[in-house]
Image (cartoon, grey):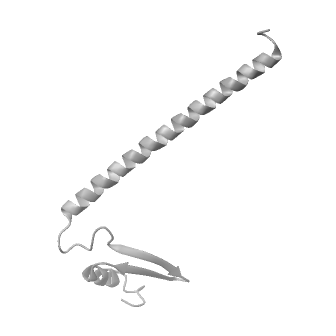
Amino acid sequence: MPGTPGNRAAVMTVGMLVIGLGLLIGGVRWYQNLHAAAVQRQRRATKRARALASARCCGLPIAVVYEGWHGSVHTFWFANTDFAAAFARANAAKVVRP
């Protein structure tokens, strides 16, 4: 009988599974598109940064590395010594060792 409670429950279960699967597939596709757009933006930004860079630039792709902190001391490493010196001058009251 098509109208029995058992049949309705089976149809509801299948319907919910189909909807759930559709949402899952849609979510995965949305994430893939979002990720692809982010990768494209990163590539464009890197390409633009390389085009703007000169021999005096601090360094590509990594200009400065923040190693972390211990207590109130933060440690940075700079690819360009001129930039490191400028950073030390700008933060003279806080720099422990330039």
List x then y, in percent, for residue 64.
35, 74
The mark tally for this picture is 0
Q: Which residue lies at the image location 38% right of the left edge and 49% below the top edge?
A: 38
Task: Work out whether 71 lies above or below 37.
Answer: below
**The C terminus: image quadrant:** bottom left
Closest to the observer, 86 or 16: 16
List x then y, in percent, for residue 60.
28, 69
Closest to the observer, 56 or 8: 8
Closest to the observer, 85 or 53: 53
Q: Is residue 14 left or right of residue 60?
A: right
**Residue 6 occupies quadrant:** top right
List x then y, in percent, for residue 62.
33, 70
Task: Work out whether 5 lies above or below 31.
Answer: above
Closest to the observer, 4 or 31: 4
Q: Which residue lies at the image location 34% right of the left edge and 54% below the top edge?
A: 42
**The N terminus: image quadrant:** top right
**Residue 66 occupies quadrant:** bottom left
Task: Work out whether 23 lies above or below 77.
Answer: above
Q: Is residue 22 left or right of residue 32?
A: right
